[in-house]
């Protein structure tokens, strides 16, 4: 990202969940992307200093866009799987997680082979990290 910015090229990626949360809450999205990232970083550092990671994740999941007009994990769970977010299976939660970079192209309710593979990877990692990923239970 830094090399791209210094070369005058478009920057993308390398955003943490905290940075994405800050962007979605307080900043504009498309125009002036590199300027936005300069503003985003100190706000993200501040967010990390005053909020727990659990709270940041909660905010992120509740403001993320999961499809056209679908905001928040509860709406996404109901829209894609017809259940409350609390009732999601591990598989459904993993499918929603891997759809986030582009939930319009990556439909969690109708996953292609690539999305299913990524969801399986998430499930395996979550089961190995169960003490840290209790939210998937």
Image (cartoon, grey):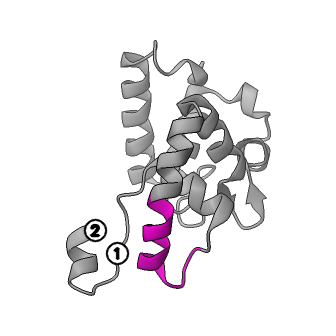
Counting every numbered tag in the picture gives: 2
Identify the residue position indicated by label 1 in the image: 11
Identify the residue position indicated by label 2 in the image: 1
Residue at the spot 45% in from the left edge and 78% down from the top edge: 35
Residue 127 % position (x, y): 42, 18
Was residue 40 drawn as part of the magenta stretch in this picture?
yes
Q: Which dot marks residue 23?
A: none
Residue 91 % position (x, y): 55, 32
- Secondary structure predominantly adopted by residues drawn in magenta: helix
The residue range painted magenta reads 29-41
Residue reaching furthest to the top? 131
Q: Secondary structure at mark 2?
A: loop
**Left or right: where does residue 17 sit relative to residue 121?**
right
Residue 60 % position (x, y): 62, 46
Residue at the spot 60% in from the left edge and 35% down from the top edge: 51
For mark 1, does the 10 Å Cα neighbourhood hold few (<14), some (14 to 19), or many (20 or more) residues? some
In-front residue for pair 12/78: 12
């Amino acid at each position: 990202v830094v090399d791209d910015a210094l070369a005058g090229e478009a920057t993308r990626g390398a955003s943490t969940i905290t940075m994405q949360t800050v962007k979605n809450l307080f900043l504009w999205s498309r125009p002036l992307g590199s300027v936005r990232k300069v503003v985003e970083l100190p706000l993200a550092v501040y967010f990390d200093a005053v909020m727990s990671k659990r709270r940041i994740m909660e905010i992120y999941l509740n403001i993320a866009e999961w499809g056209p007009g679908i905001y928040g994990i509860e709406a996404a769970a109901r829209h894609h799987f017809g259940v409350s977010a609390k009732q999601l299976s591990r598989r459904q939660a993993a499918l929603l997680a891997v759809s986030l970079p582009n939930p319009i192209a990556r439909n969690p309710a109708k996953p292609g082979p690539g999305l299913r593979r990524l969801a399986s990877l998430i499930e395996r990692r979550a089961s190995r990290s169960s003490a840290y990923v209790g939210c998937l239970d």
